[in-house]
Amino acid sequence: MDGKESLPQIELVIEASIIITTQTPKPTKQRPLSSILTRFHAGFFRISFSLGAQALLWKILMEPTNDSNPLRRLLRLFPATAFLLLWSFALFTLVLLSLLYILRCFFHFHMVKQEFLHHVGVNYLFAPWISWLLLLQSAPFLSPKTGCYLVLWWVFVIPVVVLDVKIYGQWFTKGKRFLATVANPTSHLSVIGNLMGARAAAQMGWKETAVCMFSLGTAHYLVLFVTLYQRLSVNNLPAMLRPVFFLFFAAPSMASLAWNSISGTFDTPAKMLFFLSLFLFTALIFRPTLFKKSMKRFNVAWWAYSFPLTILALAATEYAQEVNGGIAHGLMLVFSAFSVLVTLTLIVFTVLNTNMLLHDNDPILYPPNNICTAP
């Protein structure tokens, strides 16, 4: 063949039976319940105390009074079943969240400990007890004069006092440098917990106990107010948590409600606290760019809008009942409608975005390097 020898051809035959394939094992997926518990934290109780505040607002609006406001007359036409359904829904939500957190404490106690040491997460440990106190005060079948009310009040207030000793003790013993480092808007929850307990105690007729808790809350509110005004920077909180700035006006609103229950009338101190909360609310809503980044993607921190608005609406309702004027009734109508609209919107967004509630990059669970934790 043109002077060239043909090279022998070798045919390589591989039998399929001797082929060994190595497959990399697929990572085992985490069980759904365990995955939920590792991403769940006390910040989810924002939902329960927002719903509890709505229940309390509707209870007060539907109570019979001498107020000539047409809104309250209209709401009194609603059947009692509507309020009972709202209260039951708030109770169901709180029980479900409480069960999840109990399971988290049992199976992932180390993560609960990390949350306790986190400068934001520790403040949300007040949230479940605030939620229970709200439901206690709005209960449709329980009078403040009954023994059951008293027992439940003690059950819900003792954890608040224990957390007070921990948090306020650190503020007192470690000085202003420590407080300036860990103080943030969620620290108002500790103040609100004391004021909520004071209001419930005043309704039972325990005026001295109510004044004690009120003084404890307001004293530390003044310290916190001055500290945050002097030292707070927007960069101290991740963008996701910026809705908690609304807690700035929730604390004075709650203080006006507590003092109203203690004194028996919405007098001058209560009005001063209410006007302060109005100013802080106005100062925040005229800075929408502060919340621009946090609104890009839904997360559970959005529920931080509902509770402060509802507490402000409650204070406006008590103010309108005392003043009985056109402007006061207008404030009550605007804030009540606004709080209901925001709460309904959040419920819809939460139902439609349940897969986005449990974030892998939640700043409470995984704080950035520049966010300190409380020692």
Image (cartoon, rainbow, N blue to C red):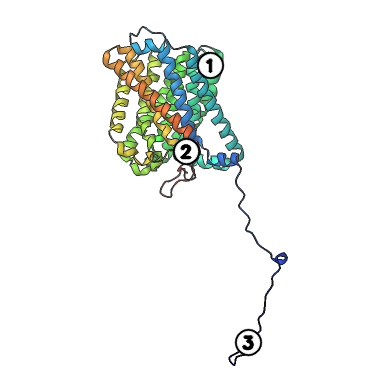
* Side (left or right) of 194 relative to 26: left
Q: Is residue 124 above or below residue 153?
A: below
Question: Which of pointers 2 and 3 lies earlier in the amino acid sequence?
Answer: 3
Q: Are marks 1 and 3 in contact (CB under 8 Å)?
A: no
Q: Alpha-carbon distance for marks 1 and 3?
A: 104 Å
Residue found at the far front of this picture: 1
Q: Name the quadrant of the N terminus.
A: bottom right
Q: Which amino acid does label 3 sit on?
A: Ser
Q: Which residue, given by chain and number where applicable, does mark 1 sit on?
A: 149
Q: Is mark 1 on a helix, strand or loop?
A: helix
Residue found at the far bottom of this picture: 3
- In percent of width and height, residue 155 lies at 55, 23
Question: Which of pointers 1 and 2 lies earlier in the amino acid sequence?
Answer: 2
Q: Which residue, given by chain and number where applicable, does mark 2 sit on?
A: 121
Q: In this view, does 318 lie above or below 224?
A: above
Q: Which residue, given by chain and number where applicable, does mark 3 sit on?
A: 6
Number of numbered callouts drawn: 3
Comparing labels 2 and 3, the label whose residue is closer to the camera: 3
Q: Is residue 234 above or below residue 18?
A: above
Q: In which quarter of the image is residue 72?
A: top left
